[in-house]
Structures are given as C-alpha cells and as structure tokens.
C-alpha cells in the first residue's frame, strides 16, 4: 500500500528522513525532490560494464544548461533521504515528463533502509534547458509485508554525490569468489 502525504508527515523525522524538508513540497501521496546543481557525464561513447567508466562533473549554471538527446546525464537529488520500514520509490513529475525529460531509466525502486541521495539517470527526447533546484521528481513510500533485512551496506548506501555505475564491482567480486 502507498502511504498518503499525511502518513508520510506522521513518520517524518523517524522512519522517514528527508533533508532539507519543506512541507510545501508534500503531495497527497508523495514528496517532490529537487535537482542538485551538478551533473555527471561519461567521457566515452562506449561504456564497459566490467570497468569504471571515466566521467566529467559539470555544473548547471543559474541561467540553465541545455541537455541534448542521445546522451545520458547522471544527476542527483538535492535532498538526502533515509527510510526505515518502508520501500521508497522514485518517479518523475508529470510536468517534467511533458517536456520530454526522463529522470530514471531503471532505478526508480529503492530498498528498505536506503540512506543517501537519489542518483537520477536523466535523458531528454529533444533539447531542453534545465535549471538547478527545480522539483523534478517525487518520492513515495510503500509498506512492506513480512520480515526483511534492511539495505545497509550496498554499493550506493550513504553516498555523498552523484554515483556513476559501480556494476564493475560485481564482476570483481565474482573473480575473487
């Protein structure tokens, strides 16, 4: 079951942490998250799953930055979130989607116990000027049924910035095992 906005507020500061928090960003059953002012772009046209891929950090200036189709931009939320007892989920806002901007390719599903900034896998269908601090996505929460082991030590737990793919670590672990 999805938590209502009122239920999210009831758990805020306890099982649900959003920092910074602004009650004006609360929706009937979600909370809007904002785009940080940095993006990460891969430096090579061909990416390799088995190796770290070089990337460049770029700043989104206050006057905006034009995103181009056919390119993946990794961003992150301005807000840090932490969740206990609930499954966090991320979706783009409809106003953003109507401009042809997607904020995640596949990683909209969070884990119980996740703590960190959400990495956004951004792509656009036509050139689009973006700005920092815009509310681009929304987090919502599902209840979980049954016993669970909380996510606590994954590759992306307690991240501090934009996280490129760390899939290569899975290949390294298989070699060692």
Image: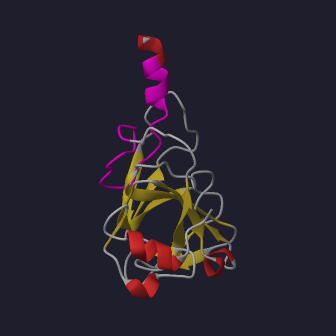
Query: Which of these two is toward me, 36 or 47?
Result: 36
Answer whether residue 158 is magenta in the image. yes
Main secondary structure of the magenta stretch: loop
- Vertical order, 128 against 104 (above or below): below
The colouring scheme, among rainbow, by chain, secondary structure or one colour, is: secondary structure
Query: Which of these two is toward me, 25 or 167?
Result: 25
Query: Which quadrant: the N terminus?
Result: bottom right
Please tell me which residue is depicted at 51% across the width and 27% down the height of the picture: 50
Residue 7 appearing in the image: yes
Query: Where residue 151 sits: x, y (%)?
Result: 42, 42
- Vertical order, 50 against 101 (above or below): above
Answer whether residue 169 is magenta in the image. yes
Span highlighted in magenta in the image:
152-173
Horizontal relation, residue 43 to residue 146: left or right: left
* The residue positioned farthest toward the front in the image shown: 146
Number of numbered discs on residues: 0
Query: Which of these two is toward me, 61 or 119?
Result: 119
Query: Where residue 81 sits: x, y (%)?
Result: 37, 62
Horizontal relation, residue 174 to residue 2: left or right: left
Query: Which of these two is toward me, 177 or 40?
Result: 177
- Vertical order, 155 against 124 (above or below): above
Residue 65 appearing in the image: no
Query: Where residue 16 sits: x, y (%)?
Result: 39, 64
Query: Where residue 102 sits: x, y (%)?
Result: 63, 66
* The residue positioned farthest toward the bottom in the image shown: 24
Query: Which quadrant: the C terminus?
Result: top left
Please tell me which residue is depicted at 46% across the width and 49% down the height of the picture: 112
- Asked where in the image residue 52 lies, by quadrant, the reply is top left
């Amino acid at each position: 079951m999805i938590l209502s906005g009122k239920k999210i507020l009831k758990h805020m500061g306890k099982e649900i942490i959003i920092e910074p928090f602004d009650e004006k960003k609360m929706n009937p059953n979600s909370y809007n998250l904002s785009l940080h002012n940095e993006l990460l772009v891969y430096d090579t046209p061909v990416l390799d799953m088995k190796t770290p891929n070089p990337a460049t950090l770029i700043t989104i200036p206050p006057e905006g930055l034009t995103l181009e189709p056919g390119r993946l931009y990794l961003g992150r939320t301005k807000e840090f979130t932490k969740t206990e007892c609930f499954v966090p989920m991320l979706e783009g806002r409809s106003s953003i989607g109507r401009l042809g901007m997607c904020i995640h390719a596949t990683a909209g599903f969070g884990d119980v116990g996740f703590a960190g900034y959400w990495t956004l896998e951004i792509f656009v269908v036509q050139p689009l000027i973006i700005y920092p601090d815009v509310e681009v996505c929304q987090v919502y929460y599902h209840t979980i049924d049954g016993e669970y082991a909380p996510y606590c030590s994954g590759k992306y737990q307690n991240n501090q910035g934009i996280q490129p793919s760390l899939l290569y670590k899975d290949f390294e672990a298989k070699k060692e095992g």
